[in-house]
Amino acid sequence: MAIKVYGAPGSTATLRVRACLAEKDLDYEFVKVDMANKEHKKPEFLARNPFGQVPVFEDGDLTLFESRAITQYLAHAYPDKGNSLIITDPKKMAILAVWIEVESQKFEPTASKLVWELILKSMLLGMSPDEAVVDEHEKKLEELLDVYEKRLSECKYLGGDSFTLVDLHHLPNLKYLMGTKVKRLFDARPHVSAWAADIQSRPGSIKAFTA
């Protein structure tokens, strides 16, 4: 088996790559990295990713890290496998690129902070969330989802009329947030709510989160 993914099952970045592999219907070997024992900081792992973060991806002699770079590679390297995930028309591709940047630069920082405070902080450290931080990032998320609501009133998905990488990139944080009180912010916006339900119900999404 040529493809390997080194990662942690609950890691949002790892889940992003696994969701992409599921969408592309590609077989791979998953190598669990024991983050609690700091395997990601040991020399053998640092040789694959000098930043000591998961996931690391291998396809034959190619080694990659950074989840969005990995999904871009998979979408372009395996165009005839599974679902496309990309757009080839230059103008539509540029619009897709804009929303990919929105996810990484605006959604990810806010959503990941909420995931940390509302879920992971308690799970990993046994600590309660900082409500001031939660309130601050809820407000940021509300403002962003207002923009999403307008966008999704114009097209079914953020990149256009088909499911693409930008929708997929949202999935891990979105999945976590749907289990918190923040879900109400998505539910309050009908187009956002429909989009969130749609992308979570895809077979590839379900497979990635239950594997």
Image (cartoon, rainbow, N blue to C red):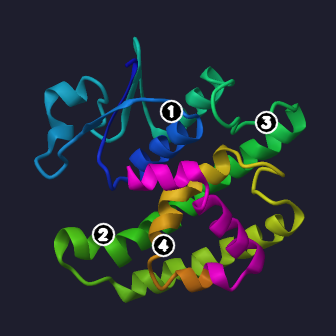
For this orientation, the residue located farthest to the left is 37
Q: Amino acid at mark 4?
A: Leu
**CB contact under 8 Å: marks 3 and 2:** no
61 versus 169 height, above or below: above
* Residue at 36% from the left image edge and 69% from the top image edge: 116
Which residue is tagged 3? 87
The answer to which image quadrant residue 45 occupies is top left
In the displayed structure image, the side of residue 184 where residue 175 appears, left or right? left
Q: CA distance from mark 2 to mark 1?
A: 25 Å
Q: Amino acid at mark 1?
A: Ile
Tell me the tag on residue 177: 4
The answer to which image quadrant residue 202 occupies is bottom right
**Residue 36 rendering spot, x and y as whole percentages:** 14, 52
Q: Quadrant of the N terminus?
A: top left
**CB contact under 8 Å: marks 3 and 1:** no
* Residue at 62% from the left image edge and 23% from the top image edge: 78
SS for tag 3?
A: loop
Q: Is residue 35 visible in the rendered structure shown here?
A: yes
Which residue is tagged 2? 120
* Residue at 67% from the left image edge and 63% from the top image edge: 198
Range covered by the magenta-colored residues: 186-211
For this orientation, the residue located farthest to the top is 61
Q: Amino acid at mark 2?
A: Leu
* Residue at 31% from the left image edge and 36% from the top image edge: 51
Queried whether the magenta region covers residue 206, the answer comes back as: yes
Which residue is tagged 1? 70
